[in-house]
Amino acid sequence: IGSSSIISTDSGTPTIQSEVSFPAGMVISHQIKQLALELNVAILLLSQVNRDGAKRETGLSIYDLKDSGDIENDADIVLLLWPKNGDIEGAKSHDEKGPYTELQYNIAKNREGERGIGGYLQFYHCIGRFK
């Protein structure tokens, strides 16, 4: 799911989470979790970072995600990504595969494994791939 910001509720009306009450965000989070369990599939849900997290240069925590309480409760794994050294422009590079951004990552939550593990990934813009 490309963004948790806009998801339809049972009424079929698109809902912007930042404009609805907390319970609606909780319902959406639980519905996504139930769908994954019913279909026995992994669902990758992208989430925005709140303003405090976006300003911080030292990395992210699970509490920097919008509706982090719902995400923390329902997610099996939370992987946080941010530009290397907190600088999106400074993290851009280029090699034979094309332009990429170097990202730091941290496994903030993992129900069935280790957490706190981190490292670096390269995101190639032109092919939409992580290496």
Image (cartoon, grey):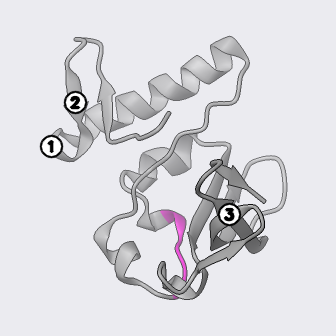
Q: What amino acid type should be assigned to the residue bearing mark 1?
A: Glu
CA gap between label 1 and label 3 equals 39 Å
Read off the magenta span.
Answer: 58-62
Q: Nearer the viewer, residue 126 or 9?
A: 126
Q: Is residue 61 magenta?
A: yes
Task: Name the residue located 82 percent from the left edge and 47 percent from the top edge.
Answer: 112
The amino acid beneath tag 2 is: Thr
Q: Residue at x 44, y 52 (%)?
A: 69
Question: How many neighbours does mark 3 have within 10 angstroms: few (below 14), some (14-19), or many (20 or more)?
Answer: few
Q: Badges 2 and 1: C-beta atoms under 8 Å apart?
A: yes
Residue on which disc 1 sits: 19
Residue 49 in picture, x, y percent from top left? 40, 62
Q: Which residue is mark 2?
A: 15
The CA span between labels 2 and 1 is 8 Å
- Determine which of the numbered discs, if any, sits on residue 2 in the image: none
How packed mark 1 is, by other alpha carbons closer than 10 Å (few <14, some 14-19, many 20 or more), is few
